Amino acid sequence: MRKFLIDTDTASDDAIALIMALREPTIQVEAITVVCGNLTVDQAVKNALNTIEAINTYAPPVYRGMHKPIMRPLFTSEYVHGSDGMGNMHLPAPAGKAEDMHAIDAIIHHIMANPHELEVVTLGPMTNLALAYLKEPRIAEYVKRVIVMGGQGLGPGNVTPVAEFNFYVDAEAVEIVLQSGMPLTFVGWDVSMDKTFIDEGDIERIAALQTPLSDFTLSCTKVLQEHNLSQYGRRGFDLPDPTAMAVAIWPDMVRAEFETYGYMETKSEQTYGQLIIDRFHVHQKPANVTICQEIDANRFKQKLLELLS
């Protein structure tokens, strides 16, 4: 059985990605580490614990991580996911608690305890992982692979014209990870706005399941649906974190990808957080990341329906 560690800034789409991982029988989630991003880290911890209880399969240990990015103030996204990050469901306090160990130490511990076996999936800013690497650089050699939801891919940004949210929150952290030598795959926001976008027909199919998790999914994405309609004129919602989770769980779902040298813009205020993709090797530097361009959208949606059933 494959082993995952999931690093998350738990809001609505993170929650759906957790449903996928915790209900997929071929995956064992060894740990969930939480970082600030969509929300404060404390709210994100609460959401992770609430989501684990809603899924009701098993409860991996949850570790609280960084309260702020490495160099900049925290920028959050309640305007996308609701004041609680979960579509304004305002769930009660969870029964579970976070572990005492800090997320940075938990990442180091779980990677080093499972050499060349643990796969890390990051769904939020990369602050926890970057600082774990700085504290213990050997994790770059011992981690099996890292699947990252982040970057604008080959499309526009969603916070600035060129920057995607997760990378914009802490671009310095992304640059540290990019230069670490970890085996990286980036699944950009553009992948979730393509054919994987959950449209009105998909929403009807989810609603027709009439299960606790299908109801949970539609409730926690209520504000996200409103945001997509007002911001992009699209009825439905994007699922950036679940598309990244799909790449992690089912690598053969990837239809198009390429290896390249990538680096982050961290100096310019106008373009801060942009992932620079040197697709045509202008810099003549060795590739340090695989960029996922497209996944099998029909299979993604079918798998999502199965795991919500």
Image (cartoon, rainbow, N blue to C red):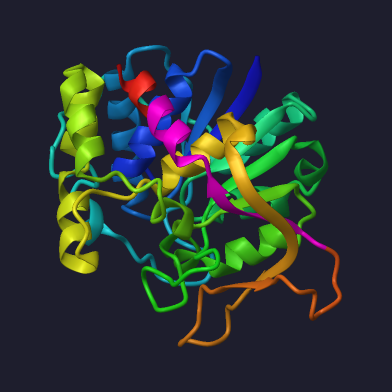
Query: In the image, what residue occupies the spot 54% across and 50% down?
Result: 294
Relative image position of residue 126 (x, y in whole percent):
55, 54
Relative image position of residue 260 (x, y in whole percent):
74, 63
Residue 297 lies in magenta, yes or no? yes
Whether residue 279 is situated above or below residue 249 in the rendered picture: below
Q: Nearer the viewer, residue 206 or 8?
A: 206
Query: In the image, what residue occupies the spot 53% across and 44% down?
Result: 295
Q: Which of 277 and 56 is in front in this view?
A: 277
* Residue interval drawn in magenta: 287-303
Whether residue 75 is situated above or below residue 43 in the rendered picture: below
Relative image position of residue 169 (x, y in whole percent):
44, 65
- Left or right of 190 on screen, residue 112: right
Q: Is residue 229 among the parts visible in the rendering?
A: yes
Q: How many labels does the image show?
A: 0
Relative image position of residue 230 (x, y in whole percent):
15, 65
Q: Is residue 102 among the parts visible in the rendering?
A: no
Query: In the image, what residue occupies the spot 66% across and 43% down?
Result: 146
Q: Nearer the viewer, residue 244 or 100?
A: 244
Quarter of the image with the C terminus in it: top left
Query: In the image, what residue occupies the spot 80% across and 54% down?
Result: 181
Q: In which quarter of the image is residue 307?
A: top left
- Left or right of 267 on screen, residue 231: left
Q: In which quarter of the image is residue 234?
A: bottom left
Residue 35 lies in magenta, yes or no? no
Q: Nearer the viewer, residue 266 or 234?
A: 234
Quarter of the image with the N terminus in it: top right
